[in-house]
Image: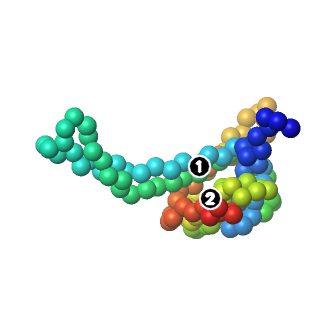
Amino acid sequence: MAGIQTDKIRGLEVLISIDGTVVGGQRGASLSMSADELDITDKNTTGYKKYLVGLKEWSISCDGLVCAGEEGYDALFNAFIAGDIVQVQFKQKEGDFGYEGPMVIASMDFDAQYDDALTYSCELKGAGDLTKVGAGA
């Protein structure tokens, strides 16, 4: 069909995995990357500041339904309790798009509303290099 773009990826297709196991109950996830900017502006700079890229960092925020006894959710929770560094993937379930690297689980929050399902949210922080996975890696 003309006009249909097949290279787009739905957010529904992207899952978080901990040490190779998909985290069950996941609803949302976001990957953030940033770098320090090193100001190298001096008195010879003419009108605009100048920068170099410093250290980089990355993190993943995710949330979902608490699935007690589900292998991926338990891996996430247990890694937080133990303070373990885990290999995390932010990856399309059927396809080549994705990123991965070692992470620590920096925080976990739970929300138990009387009129809704028990949910969690967590923040994972990169503990090493972020790399691309899939065919284009």
- Residue 119, picture quadrant: top right
What number is the disc on residue 31? Answer: 1
Image location (x, y in percent) of residue 87: 62, 66
- Residues at discs 2 and 1 in contact (Cβ within 8 Å): yes
Residue 90 drawn above or below residue 117? below
Query: In this view of the protein, which residue sits in the foreground, 33 or 125?
Result: 33
Q: Is residue 71 found left or right of 19 in the rendered image?
A: right
Amino acid marked by disc 2: Tyr
What number is the disc on residue 99? Answer: 2
Q: In percent of the image, x 57 and y 63: which residue is there?
A: 131
Query: In this view of the protein, which residue sits in the foreground, 2 or 115?
Result: 2
Amino acid marked by disc 1: Leu
Q: Is residue 126 visible?
A: yes
Is the residue marked by circle 1 packed among few (<14), some (14-19), or many (20+) residues within 10 Å? few
Q: Is residue 6 found left or right of 76 in the rendered image?
A: right
Disc nearer the start of the sequence (2/1): 1
- Residue 1, picture quadrant: top right
Q: Is residue 107 visible?
A: no
